[in-house]
């Protein structure tokens, strides 16, 4: 099962994904896509780490998400990816301009074939004004495209607001 959990900053999307993983009672592998480029980001990472059960496996993968998923995939486990927004930033800012298109395609191709239950967390970026800067507009555009494509292949899509999940596709929470 593939679940896409979207929401704004501090909407409760990560907490919902973590609770969903815990309630599954399956072993969990957490894929962290963040990179600590400054002290504030390191604080965010530390906060997220403190929230997760110590029994979960952790894999840090900022770029090659599809390859990572394929490598760790197995039946009877949950893989929680947090978050696609940071992953998109990482691939867009990489020196190889083709990396974003290649990695998005690989991700979309591999997801339907995985045996693990997949929880994908991402920020919904399409609710604000159109950004003024070129890279910001590209980020919003590419994230929006990815979310639409992921929504099509996901079994369940949830949008979080103020800690409340709204089911957009699939069964109730």
Image: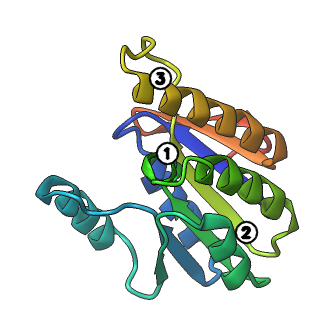
Which residue lies at the image location 45% right of the left edge and 88% below the top edge? 55
Residue at the far bottom: name it.
55
Look at 82% across and 75% down and name the residue there: 115
Q: Which residue is mark 1?
A: 92
- Say which residue appears at 34% left-offset and 40% top-offset: 10
Q: Residues within 10 Å of mark 2 (few under 14, many from 20)?
A: many
Q: CA distance from mark 3 to mark 1?
A: 12 Å
- Depicted 140 relative to depicted 69: above or below: above
Q: Residues within 10 Å of mark 1 (few under 14, many from 20)?
A: many
Q: Are marks 3 and 2 in contact (CB under 8 Å)?
A: no
For residue 117, the mark is 2
Residue 137 - label:
3
Identify the mark nearer the N-term, 1 or 2. 1
Q: Residue 117 location, x and y as percent?
A: 73, 68
Answer with left or right where residue 51 lies relative to residue 105: left
Quadrant showing the N terminus? bottom right
Does label 3 or label 2 sit earlier along the sequence?
2
Q: Give percent across and percent down for residue 161.
A: 46, 31
User: Horizontal and vertical percent for residue 59?
Assistant: 48, 79
- Distance in Å between CA atoms under marks 3 and 2: 32 Å
Helix, strand or loop at label 3? It is: helix
Where disc 1 sits, the SS reads helix
Question: For residue 167, which quarter of the picture?
Answer: top right
């Amino acid at each position: 099962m593939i679940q896409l959990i979207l929401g704004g900053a501090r909407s409760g999307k990560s907490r919902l994904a973590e609770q969903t993983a815990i309630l599954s009672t399956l072993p969990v592998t957490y894929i962290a896509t963040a990179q600590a480029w400054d002290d504030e980001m390191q604080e965010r990472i530390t906060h997220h780490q403190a929230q997760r059960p110590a029994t979960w496996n952790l894999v840090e993968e900022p770029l090659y998400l599809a390859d990572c998923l394929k490598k760790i995939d197995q039946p009877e486990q949950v893989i929680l990816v947090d978050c696609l927004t940071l992953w998109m930033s990482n691939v867009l800012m990489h020196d190889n301009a083709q990396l974003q298109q290649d990695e998005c395609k690989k991700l979309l191709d591999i997801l339907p074939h995985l045996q693990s239950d997949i929880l994908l967390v991402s920020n919904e970026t399409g609710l604000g004004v159109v950004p003024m800067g070129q890279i910001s507009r590209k980020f919003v555009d590419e994230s929006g495209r990815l979310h639409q494509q992921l929504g099509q292949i996901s079994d369940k899509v949830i949008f979080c607001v103020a800690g409340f999940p709204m089911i957009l596709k699939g069964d109730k929470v």
